[in-house]
Amino acid sequence: MALEIRQSLKLSQQLVITPQLQQAIKLLQLTRIELQALVQHELVENPILEEQAEDTIEKEEEVSETEPLNLLHDQHDKEQKVEEVGNKDGDMKEPTNFDWENYLGTYNAAETHVGGGNATDLSDELPSYENNAPTHATLHEHLLWQLHMSSLSPNEMKIAEELIGNINEDGYLISNLEELAQKTETDIEFIQDVLESLQEFDPAGVASRDLKECLSIQIRPFVKDRELLQKLVEHHLTNLELKKYPPILRDLNISTEKLKELAHVISTLEPKPGRPFGGENPNYIVPDVFVRKVGSDYVVMLNDDGLPKLQISNFYRNALFKKEMPSNTKEYIQDKLRSAMWLIRSIHQRQRTLYKVTSSIVKFQKGFLEDGIAFLKPMILRDVADDIQMHESTVSRVTTNKYVQTPRGLFELKFFFNTKLPSSSVDGTTSETVKNEIRKMISAEDVKNPLSDQAIAEILTKSQIQVARRTVAKYRETMGILPSSRRRQLL
């Protein structure tokens, strides 16, 4: 059989993820803050995009908030007509964003003038509004500030600065004094004296080398019971942690009430002195969706506050109709126009999908919204996907890092997806329901004889909720609840 080269046509279908489609998928899983940052970046990079004028936004806000889907469809249709036909009218007004920074400067200058002082414009001398935000000192900065306010000699300050540089975020000294003495070519007794001076600084217990030394420094003000407290710290910290009180009572020869008093003092001490200065600033959650009860129904409303309303610039749109425009310039504008229109459509699609998913969740979980966590129904991604005729991956993306404000509180959308426990004989029993039952039982238990994980599992079994002991332990640890041996309190 002879071999030959031949050309042929073949028709086939192939799924290709275009860059525009990738952008639309990416927008689905972006958080609210990330979406705002992306929009601001596009406003800077794409000259075709601009924010809507305030008068246009006010007209949109007059429409009922209970019909966000209609608003989104109308806006989408409006953008399609603009793209197809074009607008040959004059340019729209530029958005009149309020300049708070200039307002603050003008207000301060006017206040000075009214008070009889110098009426000179102080706006150039005042720091910007963003720079007025409060800052928190770190542990090292706090210690160095105290060091420079102390009466230590220059040599002692030099050693103290070296010691402060070797204190970790928890407030403990992590360097060895012998190594530090060799590094600074200083006598170790001199370093020890400087360390003792440093341990007098705030917070109490800072610059300690271990937990016992840290607690020993903090019990110095308790003159009356210092000796007993010192023995507790030196010999019985483990017994206190495990609630083993008989060995402590025998060793210290004290009553149970006295031990209870001493244990309370120990519990008020800070094992990590640097804790108040560590960590990051708290991150506040802004809900993406609001669910409010109107009559007997629940209404879903998207939170568009802070998200710029985008539109196509009339100036560049009208420029496309000018015959004298160079071809490369027109091609550039058309490319940016397509990119801008796709971004606007993708954002609208994201908001529509978020609205549909939240509405479906509200429909499934109406019992939870009415009566609480005990009525949270088992639900998976497939349930919502089938309800709104979308793929499970789309539902997963749109519920990631999205939060909803409900009459029951603020929840992540992922919270509402729980599978039914296979071993439970009660319909609608989810993991969150079991956690709530465990939390209620522990909150009502006898503190002198707390419930063990096995006892909780047996109580749940009597309620027709089949849960193993290790499952109870896992749920308890997830909720941050200590085991029964550490929840037991003194008689």
Image (cartoon, helix red, strand yellow):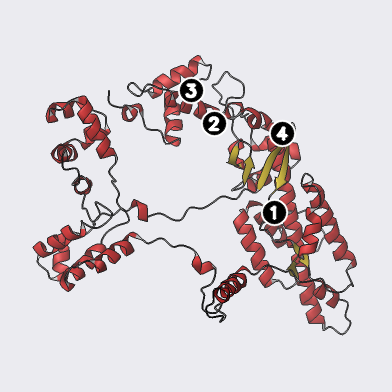
Asked if the residue at tag 4 contacts the one at tag 1, i.e. Cβ–Cβ closer than 8 Å, the answer is no
Q: Is residue 116 visible?
A: yes
Q: Is 332 drawn above or below residue 429 in the view shown?
A: below
Looking at marks 1 and 4 on the same chain, the residue that comes earlier in the sequence is marked by 1
Residue under numbered circle 4: 363
- Front disc: 3 or 2: 2
Looking at marks 3 and 2 on the same chain, the residue that comes earlier in the sequence is marked by 2
Gap between marks 2 and 1 measured at Cα:
30 Å
Q: Considering the numbered disc 4 on the image, is that residue within a helix, a strand or a loop? A: helix
Could you say which quadrant of the image residue 107 lies in?
Answer: bottom right
Q: Position of residue 23 (x, y in %)?
A: 68, 59
Q: Considering the numbered disc 1 on the image, is that residue within a helix, a strand or a loop? A: loop
Residue under numbered circle 3: 467
Q: Position of residue 481 (x, y in %)?
A: 40, 33
Q: Considering the numbered disc 3 on the image, is that residue within a helix, a strand or a loop? A: loop
Looking at marks 2 and 1 on the same chain, the residue that comes earlier in the sequence is marked by 1
Identified at 63% across, 27% down, the residue is 371
- Tell which of 391 and 37 is nearer to you: 37
Q: Amino acid at mark 3?
A: Val
- Tell which of 118 and 161 is nearer to you: 118
- Front disc: 2 or 1: 1
Identified at 65% across, 56% down, the residue is 26
Badge 2: how crowded within 10 Å, few (<14), some, or many (20+)?
Answer: many
Gap between marks 4 and 2 measured at Cα:
19 Å
Residue under numbered circle 2: 432
Residue under numbered circle 1: 304
Gap between marks 3 and 1 measured at Cα:
43 Å
